[in-house]
Image (cartoon, rainbow, N blue to C red):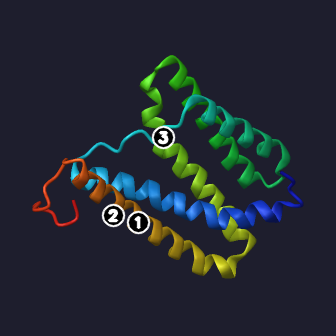
């Protein structure tokens, strides 16, 4: 992968950050509102998590923008811990999953918004809302298919 300039990463952050924010937010909101556990944020295999960690670490070294560098440093640390926890079977990573992904996505979104403020006014709310709704609907119908809830629940969105 070649990065011609930091503008490419910033522009990509505008399209990657808001959907991750929407997904993480929807999963946390669904867990709180419906009383169901949020699950393991980032349940990849150890080699895949390690690959993400290495890729993020390479980006940390190559990127000059401090906001993007912080975002990818968080991702590299988080994915390293996921890989380690999968190898040694330590469940401590469950508590770090959503906050780490939220911080990564928020920083990436901020960097993207700073690179193109006019486009950010349209894309951030649109992508965040779209992913929030899609994630909520996926959790809702996933729970129905797995028999974790009745179609006739008290709260119409759980």
Question: Is residue 101 depicted above or below 112 in this figure?
Answer: above
User: Helix, strand or loop at disc 1?
Assistant: helix
**What is the CA distance from the residue labelled 2 to the residue labelled 1?**
5 Å
In the rendered image, the residue lying farthest to the front is 145
Residue ID for mark 1: 134
Percent of width and height locating residue 93 = 48, 31
Report whether 115 appears left or right of 127. Answer: right
**Quick check: 140 left or right of 53?**
left
| Residue plotted at (37% across, 52% down) | 28
* Residue 3 horizontal/vertical position (percent): 86, 56
Label 3 crowd bin: few (<14), some (14–19), many (20+), radius 10 Å: many
Nearest the viewer among 148 and 127 is: 148
Residue 26 vs 43, above or below: the answer is below
Look at discs 3 and 2 and give the one toward the viewer.
2
Is 12 left, or right, of 2 in this rendering?
left
Q: Residue 50 in the image: x percent, y percent?
A: 65, 32
Question: Sequence order check: which comes first, mark 1 or mark 3?
Answer: 3
Residue behind mark 2: 137
Tell me the residue at 79%/64% (across/down): 8
Could you classify mark 1 by the number of other residues whose Cα lies within 10 Å: few (under 14), some (14-19), or many (20 or more)? some
Q: Residue furthest top?
A: 88
Q: What label sits on residue 97 in the rendered view? A: 3
Label 2 packing within 10 angstroms: few (<14), some (14-19), many (20+): some
Distance of mark 1 from mark 3, alpha carbons? 20 Å
Of 37 and 112, nearer the camera is: 37
The C terminus is located in which quarter? bottom left
Position of residue 137 measured from the top left corner of the image (x, y, whole percent): 33, 63
Report helix, strand or loop for mark 2.
helix
- Asked which secondary structure carries label 3, the reply is helix
Snapshot quadrant of residue 82: top right
| Contact, mark 2 vs mark 1 (Cβ under 8 Å) | yes
């Amino acid at each position: 992968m070649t990065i011609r300039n930091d503008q490419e990463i910033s522009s990509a952050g505008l399209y990657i950050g808001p959907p991750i924010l929407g997904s993480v937010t929807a999963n946390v909101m669904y867990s709180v509102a419906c009383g169901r556990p949020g699950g393991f944020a980032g349940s990849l295999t150890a080699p895949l998590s390690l690959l993400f960690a290495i890729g993020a670490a390479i980006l940390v070294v190559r990127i000059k923008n401090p906001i993007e560098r912080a975002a990818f440093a968080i991702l590299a640390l988080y994915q390293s811990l996921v890989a380690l926890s999968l190898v040694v079977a330590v469940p401590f990573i469950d508590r770090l999953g959503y906050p780490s992904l939220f911080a990564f996505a928020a920083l990436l979104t901020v960097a993207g918004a700073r690179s193109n403020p006019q486009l950010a006014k349209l894309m951030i709310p649109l992508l965040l809302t779209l992913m929030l709704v899609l994630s909520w609907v996926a959790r809702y119908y996933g729970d129905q298919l797995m028999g974790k809830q009745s179609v006739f629940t008290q709260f119409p969105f759980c």
